[in-house]
């Protein structure tokens, strides 16, 4: 048994399952954080990094769940493959 693929596969699988099954939850959290930070900056809060407001406006969160679901499904497959590789020997 090889430990490295096992230790990499378990967190990859654990992170991929929620992304694949409930991508709307991740999107709603990202939208809420994005909206809150933009409102803080509009209210006069200092920027955390150079041109933070401009980057928030230029790169809003995704509008659909498709990308999150695809990344979640790929993470599940990669996690399962890594776990299977760890028991191969």
Image: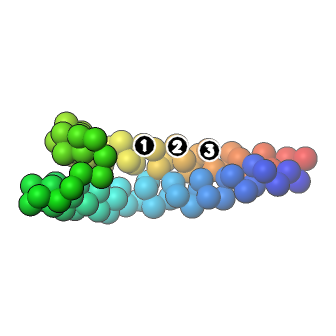
Q: Position of residue 86 (x, y in %)?
A: 80, 50
Q: Residue at x 73, y 56 (%)?
A: 7
Which residue is pictured at 57% across the width and 61% down the height? Answer: 14
For the residues labelled 2 and 1, say whether their Cβ atoms are less than 8 Å apart. yes
Q: CA distance from mark 3 to mark 1?
A: 12 Å
Q: Do the CB atoms of the residues marked 3 and 2 lie less than 8 Å apart?
A: yes
The answer to which of marks 3 and 1 sits earlier in the sequence is 1
- Front one among 2 and 54: 54
Give the residue at x 63% y 50%. Answer: 79
Secondary structure of residue under mark 3: helix
In screen coordinates, is 42 left or right of 28?
Answer: left
Q: Which residue is painted at 18% across and 39% down in the image?
A: 54
Q: Which residue is mark 1?
A: 70
List x then y, in percent, for residue 17: 50, 58
- Report how many numbered discs are placed on residues in the image: 3
Residue 78: image tag: 3
Q: Position of residue 26 (x, y in %)?
A: 34, 59
Q: Residues within 10 Å of mark 3 (few under 14, many from 20)?
A: some
Instruction: Assign a secondary structure to mark 2.
Output: helix
Q: Please tell me the numbered disc located at residue 47.
A: none
In the figure, 36 relative to 50: above or below? below
Q: Around disc 2, counting alpha carbons within 10 Å, would you say few (fewer than 14), some (14 to 19), or many (20 or more)?
A: some
Q: Which mark is residue 74?
A: 2
Most distant residue in the left direction? 43
Q: CA distance from mark 2 to mark 1?
A: 6 Å
Q: Can residue 64 be seen in the rendering of this structure? A: no
């Amino acid at each position: 048994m090889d430990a490295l693929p096992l230790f990499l596969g378990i967190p990859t699988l654990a992170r991929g399952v929620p992304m694949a099954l409930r991508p709307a939850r991740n999107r709603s959290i990202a939208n809420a954080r994005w909206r809150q930070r933009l409102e803080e900056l509009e209210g006069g809060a200092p920027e955390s990094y150079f041109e933070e407001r401009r980057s928030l406006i230029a790169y809003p969160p995704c509008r659909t769940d498709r990308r999150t679901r695809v990344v979640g499904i790929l993470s599940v497959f990669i996690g399962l493959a890594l776990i299977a590789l760890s028991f191969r020997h």
